[in-house]
Image (cartoon, rainbow, N blue to C red):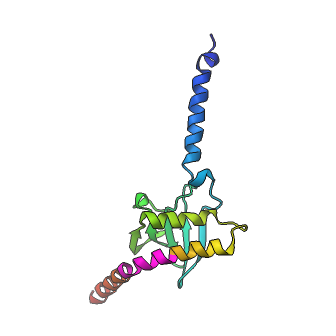
Amino acid sequence: MSVISRFGPRLGLVASVALLAACGSLVSGVRPLNAEYCDNFLIYDMCARDTNRDGVVEVVYFTDTREVFMYHPESEGNYPSDLGLHRCAMPMDEELVATTNRVFYVDDSTTFLEKQDIKGAMMLKYVTYMPEVTACNLRAEQEAASN
């Protein structure tokens, strides 16, 4: 009995399960179109980056300073080497991660309304973080002024 005929059905089953698991790990089973999405939000130019192309955002950073200011909680301390860390960087909550993930599926066929919906949802979430970020920046500026 050959090895292939002996393990073939099992190997096929294992390969099928692995393929299904790989597809299920992506949002809706669809591979993201982009690994990085940049746009202007409020008064800042920002980018969201999916470092491993699984459709889940790892970091959001300012384009001018190239500093991470928001990150996926599981990515804490593991940031791309080409980016710094903002002094007031914060982890994103699940809702913001889910909303930000949507930008990786934007392409030329995405309607203006859908793009505005994504941008608006992101801005609403960013605004909820602003008081904490403002307080952090103020504390850092006061500390720098006193030294």
Residue 26 pos. (x, y %): 57, 52
Q: Is residue 66 above or below residue 36?
A: below
- Is 60 rendered above or below residue 145? above
Say whether residue 130 is magenta: yes
Quarter containing the C terminus: bottom left
Residue 35 placed where, x, y %? Answer: 60, 61
Q: Residue at 65% of width from left, 60% of height from top?
A: 33
Residue 115: which quarter of the image? bottom right
Instruction: Count up the numbered dots.
Output: 0
Give coordinates of residue 139: x percent, y percent.
Answer: 30, 83
Q: Residue at horizontal 72%, vertical 68%?
A: 108
Q: Quadrant of residue 137?
A: bottom left
Q: Nearer the viewer, residue 58 or 13?
A: 13
Kindly give the residue lying farthest to the top in the view shown.
Answer: 1
Q: Residue 66 colored magenta?
A: no
- Residue at (53, 67) in percent of width and height: 100
Residue 66 appears in the rendering: no
Q: How far from the left and from the top, in percent, is residue 121? A: 52, 74
Residue 21 visible (yes or no): yes
* Residue extending farthest right: 109
Q: Which residues are magenta?
A: 123-133
Task: Say if 5 sits above or below 65 in the image.
Answer: above
SS majority, magenta: helix
Q: Furthest-bottom residue in view?
A: 145
Return the residue nearer the eye: 98 or 84.
98
